[in-house]
Image (spheres, rainbow, N blue to C red):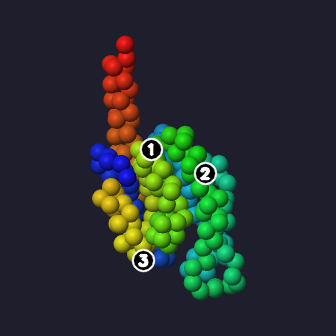
Amino acid sequence: MIALNGPRLAATFYERGFDVDALLLKCCAELRASGLRVGGTIQRAAGDRGQCASSVHVVDLSSGEAFDIWENRGVCARGCRLDERGLVESESSILTSIAERVDLVVINRFARAESLGRGLIGCFIAAIEAGIPVLTAVRPPYIEAWETFQDGLGQVLPAAADAIVGWACEESTSMRSIAAACLIASDLNSP
């Protein structure tokens, strides 16, 4: 990982049953309304709240393209139903957002696959290396793996829109200031 001037990773911890996707979507809408360029993915599940999901997709925040990440193993099957092939397919959308230098990358989850060093872990690393702030959501079974991965570069945000939006705006302002300072320095060093 690279050294940064403060946390560039943020996670909101949430319990099963909390609609963290609605919260993240609301935050993304507020951030876009304030002029920030937001990229990455949000998770979308179909099915009644509190019931077993009938499908789960990650949706590209820029294009709206949906990637199926749910293995269909029958109604209310137990155990992890994640189909990592869908995560691999969604990876290119996140990497495109990073290449386009968005102000914030949202990666829907740091969960089982990432805790095992798979899933979208490469997207987290790519955003960090690009110096782009990353926002994600983490449930309790994966907090220890998250803490190990972020290694002091991240911070925990309450599951509240004002805290998340405030962090993202502050990080974006900080990144723009750093970019402007680098541009000025490079102009000063030009012959």
Residue at 48% across / 50% down in the picture? 126
Q: Position of residue 95 (x, y in %)?
A: 56, 49
- The residue depicted at 54 percent of the width and 42 percent of the height is 99
- Which residue occupies 49% across, 76% down? 17
Nearer the camera: disc 1 or disc 3:
1
Location of residue 56 (image quadrant): bottom right
In this view, the residue in front, 62 or 115, is 115
x and y percent of residue 88 in the render? Answer: 61, 61
Residue 119 rendering spot, x and y as whole percentages: 54, 64
Q: Residues within 10 Å of mark 2 (few under 14, many from 20)?
A: many
Q: Label 3: which residue?
A: 141
Q: Does residue 59 lie above or below 46 as drawn?
A: above
Front disc: 1 or 2: 1
Give the residue number, with chain letter if any, for mark 2. 93
Q: Amino acid at mark 1?
A: Ala
- Mark 3 neighbour density, 10 Å: few (under 14) some (14–19) many (20 or more): few
Mark 1 is surrounded, within 10 Å at the Cα level, by few (under 14), some (14 to 19) or many (20 or more) other residues, namely few
